[in-house]
Structures are given as structure tokens and as C-alpha cells.
Image (cartoon, grey):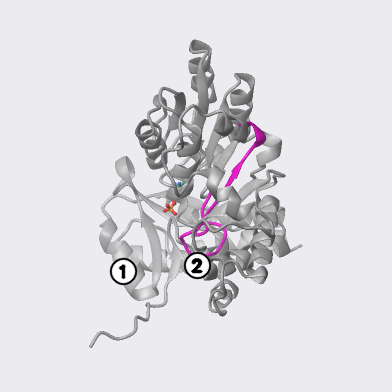
Amino acid sequence: MIKSFHPPLRTLMGPGPSDVHPRVLSAMARPTIGHLDPAFIGMMDEIKHLLQYALRTENPLTLPVSAPGSAGMEACFVNLVEPGDKIIVCQNGVFGGRMKENVERFGGVALMVEDAWGTAVSVDKVRHIMQQHDDIKALAFVHAETSTGVCSDARALCRLARDYGCLSIVDAVTSLGGIELDVDQWGIDALYSGTQKCLSAPPGISPVTFSERALIKISQRQTRVPSWFLDKNLVMGYWGGGAKRAYHHTAPVNALYGLHEALVMLQDEGLEQAWQRHALHHRALRDGLEAMGLQMAVAADVRLPQLNSVTIPEGIDDPRLRNALLERYGLEIGAGLGVLAGKVWRIGLMGSSCTQRHVMLCLDALENTLLELDGDIHGGRAAAAARAVYAETEH
Ligand SMILES: *Cc1c(COP(=O)(O)O)cnc(C)c1O
């Protein structure tokens, strides 16, 4: 007989999912009601307002897609790309490559701007390619590249898109809730995010928002949106219809209770306070790691606080170390991806996984395990270095 599944207790400090807050988990255990129940519709409207707050936008077309971040990505591209459209796609890690896939599958032409993994998207290279073409339809890039831990200058890139009369499509899966993000101020036209990174909710939902300019482009399409499920014109009848909501698909009712609670928590904490919290715990983790003798893999000026790439010291068996962390401490950290596989660890400090407890546990577990594996590090210094950062902020 197969029995009920009880997951092991873990502390999630990888690239996502991050720890889900108990308030969010208990919200999800509340009774399921009909998705056209007036009470549920009221909650959907609140989610929309909370998302507008979190994204700093007044866009009426702001809603959670009932599927993971990758579906939010697809929702942006499938609605905004038509056959033959030239789209600049910036790639400096894994996720830019997926944007290219999306553009090409929907018949667009991807003009690639490539930068090395571990560096930011070059605004100059983007400007250069915009100067060479006068028919670019959109600029697509990843704000927070989770595969490397790099932050690109979304404000400058979106301004460039405006200056050259094209739309901007932004991957904010890891940035939302963790670092500054200002949809209206920066002039972002289409954005998708996720719930399992800095929002402290489980995976499976993708907040998206579309600007007025993006809606005009959608309304002027010559061809039908090639996806039924993600066609914004149809979804709007469900999310935007107020009381006369039309059935489109059955919303993931309990998952949306969870998102609602996560967004209420973000609102209670305050958006800027959440950004400051990520910055603080990042500094403590960084000082602890450096006191141990480890090195951050990404330059300080483009480093993400919520995803820390750390160079693996010479001679350390990467899978063995990560397995030891998981088995002995219940601690998950992320492996390097692509060209960084085996070269870095990715330590996430996202949402509910961004606390002093997480920082201290990670430093302690990493230090002990590295010493056991004969790693060339300094023992006994990391915790004090991290504590010094916290002490500084207390007065
Ligand atoms: C996690 C992530 C995604 C994909 O989200 P899923 O929920 O796994 O589909 C996309 N982009 C970035 C930058 C991410 O970190």
C-alpha cells in the first residue's frame, strides 16, 4: 500500500523554491470555494490590487497566470510577438535562452545581445543594435538572472526601449519582492514573475502585467494569438470582468489563497522594507563567507542580494558537499548551471528564506562541512563577521 506523502523538513536556500511562510501554507489549507463565488471574486480583486502595489503599477491588466513563471514568460511572448517581428533578446544566463526559444516559436526573429554568464546585460550593446535597425518591435531581458546571480539595469534598458519606440518585456521572476522594481516609473511594457522566489509562496503561479502600449500592440495584431489559454483578450473576460465574470478556466483556488496571503505579508512589511531586508541579510552572508575565505563569483556592483553565487574552493567535491548539507542540516543550496556548473554554488536568500536564522545556519553548515572535507578555509570567523553586520544595524 502506498501511504500519504510527508516531505522531509528542509531549509530552502537555493534558486527557488524558497521557504514558504507558515501563514501562506495555512491560508492554502482553508476550504475550497467555487471560483465564481462572489467571495472568491472579491479576493481576486484584492490580489490584483496587491500585485499592482508590489509591482508599482496602475496597469489594469495585472493578474496572476494560473501556471508557473515559465507560463508567464510564454504569456508575454505569445501575445506580443507576431510572425516576422524583430525582437532584441539579451542573454547573460539560462533564462535569456528561453526568451529566444519563445520568440522563435511564435515566428519572431530574435536579435541576440550576448554577455558573459556572471556579467550584466550591456546597455551599450543594446543601444548599438537598436541604432542599426529601425523596425525593432520589442526588447526582452532578464532583470535578475537566477542562473548566475546578476542584476541588469532594468531602468536603463526600458528607457532605451522607449527612446527607440519599442516595447520592453522583462523577466522579474526573481526580482519581485527582493530588489527595487518599478513598473510604471521605469516604463516596463510587459512583465512576468513567479511566486516561489521572493514572494514566499509555493511555485505554480505567475504574476504578469501589461502596459497600455502593450495592449495597443495586442489589439493591433494581424494574426490570432496562437495560444488559447494564454490569450490575454480571453483571460481579461475572467480577471477583468468585475461581477459579470465569464468562465475561462477554473482558477487554482487554494493556490490563490496562498498568493493573497503572501502579498498581504509583503504589504504589511512594506515593499522598501522587504528590499532592505534582502540587502541586509545579503551583507551578513557575504561578510561571513568572505571571513571564511570564500569568494563571491559576481562583481559587487551587479550582485543580486537574493541569489549569491559563491566560487567553489579548489579540491572540493561539489555534489558531495551539497549532499552533506542536505542530509545533515536539511539545508538545500543550489548548484551552478551551464558554464558555471561545478564552479559555483548558488545560495538563495529569497522571501521567507531571507532571515538571520537562515544566514547563520548556512554559514555554520557550510563551514563545518568544508572543514570536514579538508577545504582550505578559515574556521571560526564566519559567524562573528555576520553578527558584526547585524550589530551595526541595531543602533
Ligand atoms: C525560476 C525562474 C523562471 C522560471 O520560473 P518557473 O516558475 O520555474 O517556471 C524564469 N526566470 C527566472 C529568472 C527564474 O529565476
- Which residue lies at the image location 58% right of the left edge and 32% below the top edge? 219
Q: Nearer the viewer, mark 2 or mark 1?
A: 2
- Which residue lies at the image location 39% right of the left edge and 33% below the top edge? 106
**Any magenta on residue 17?**
no
Q: Which mark is residue 324?
A: 1
Instruction: State the SS at label 1.
Output: helix
| x, y percent for residue 181 | 64, 44
Please state which of residues 148 and 38 is positioned toward the viewer in this rendering: 38
Is residue 188 placed above or below 83 in the rendered structure?
Answer: below
Q: Which mark is residue 19?
A: 2
Residue type at mark 1: give it.
Answer: Ala
The quadrant of the picture occupied by the C terminus is bottom right
Residue type at mark 2: give it.
Answer: Asp
| x, y percent for residue 145 | 47, 43
Please state which of residues 313 and 268 is positioned toward the viewer in this rendering: 268
| Residue at the outermost bottom position | 1
Circle 1 residues within 10 Å: few <14, some 14–19, many ≥20: some
Circle 2 residues within 10 Å: few <14, some 14–19, many ≥20: many
Instruction: State the SS at label 2.
Output: loop
Q: Would you say residue 176 is visible in this rendering? A: no
The mark that comes first in sequence, 2 or 1, is 2
Left or right, 378 with respect to 237, comes to: left
| x, y percent for residue 364 | 45, 68
Query: Magenta residues?
Result: 192-213
Q: Main secondary structure of the magenta part?
A: loop
Specify the quadrant of the image occupied by residue 94: top left
Q: Which mark is residue 297?
A: none
Left or right, 300 with respect to 340, comes to: right
